[in-house]
Image: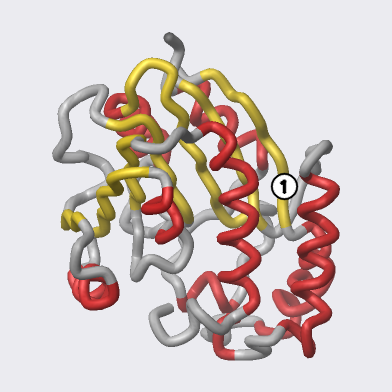
Amino acid sequence: MAETETVHWWYGATRSLLRQVLAPHLVEGSSLLDLGCGTGATGGWLEDFGDTVSLDFEALALEIYREKSPGGSFVRADAQALPFRAASFDAVLCVTVLCHESIADPVDVVRECARVLRPGGVACLMEPGVRSLRRAHDRQTHTARRFAVADLAGAAAASGLDVVRETGAYSFLVPPATVKALTERKRTRSDLETSSTGLGGILPRVARLERRWLERHDLPAGLSAVVLAAKPR
């Protein structure tokens, strides 16, 4: 991740997507939590809106992130038992955490997100989409499960959050990913190892077109599932 986050097209497109979905619900000076921050690949932009706590269970990821952002606030902890008081944050960003094999029950993590949110605060969840599409990339990234959009929305609702938005993303990647899943069989390989430019810039352009659609519409499914949910006031 650290080697590719600034050059791989997917990370750039995902930062743009998350900012498009979450930023309209943020105000300057917010208190923010980047849950499962990794090396900052998807949530580093939160610092533009306020004080951000970056949390991950992987010590090396936090070490790399701290080197890039020495003034940041970093916490090593389990997403299933967050070390924060209730109502500590205005927003929580949680990207590709619920899918991880270390998570026993994804709903437990979403409940923790809801607990640390202030009334009126928002949680943005983004996870691998299409339940049946397990492939080599999932084995490389320790992904134990994928989600339908309704699965994420259900987890948010079960945690006492009001679902504001639920949509698929990267819908155009589902057909090629399906082909890859059939041909890769038991191989283990990350998608980040290939095509950092996205077929010479084609995939980033298609992703931009999809984001334009998502400005006004939702998608029923995609290679990613995205849910925005708010804590009742």
Toward which corner of the image does residue 152 lie, by quadrant? top right
**Which residue shows up at 50% across the image and 79% down it?**
6
Crowd class of label 1 (few under 14; some 14 to 19; many from 20; radius 10 Å) = many
Toward which corner of the image does residue 38 lie, by quadrant? bottom left
Name the image quarter holding the C terminus.
Answer: top left
* Image side of residue 37 versus residue 83, left or right: right
Residue 117, horizontal then vertical, whole percent = 33, 27
**Which residue shows up at 19% across the image and 63% down it?**
71
**Which residue shows up at 66% across the image and 40% down it?**
149
Farthest residue, direction top = 233
Query: Disc 1 residue type?
Result: Gly
Residue 19, horizontal then vertical, whole percent = 57, 50
Q: Which residue is mark 1?
A: 168
**Which residue shows up at 26% across the image and 42% down it?**
80
* Image side of residue 208 versus residue 150, left or right: right
Residue 193, horizontal then vertical, whole percent = 56, 89
Residue 144, horizontal then vertical, whole percent = 46, 59
Determine whether 32 is above or below 145 in the image.
above
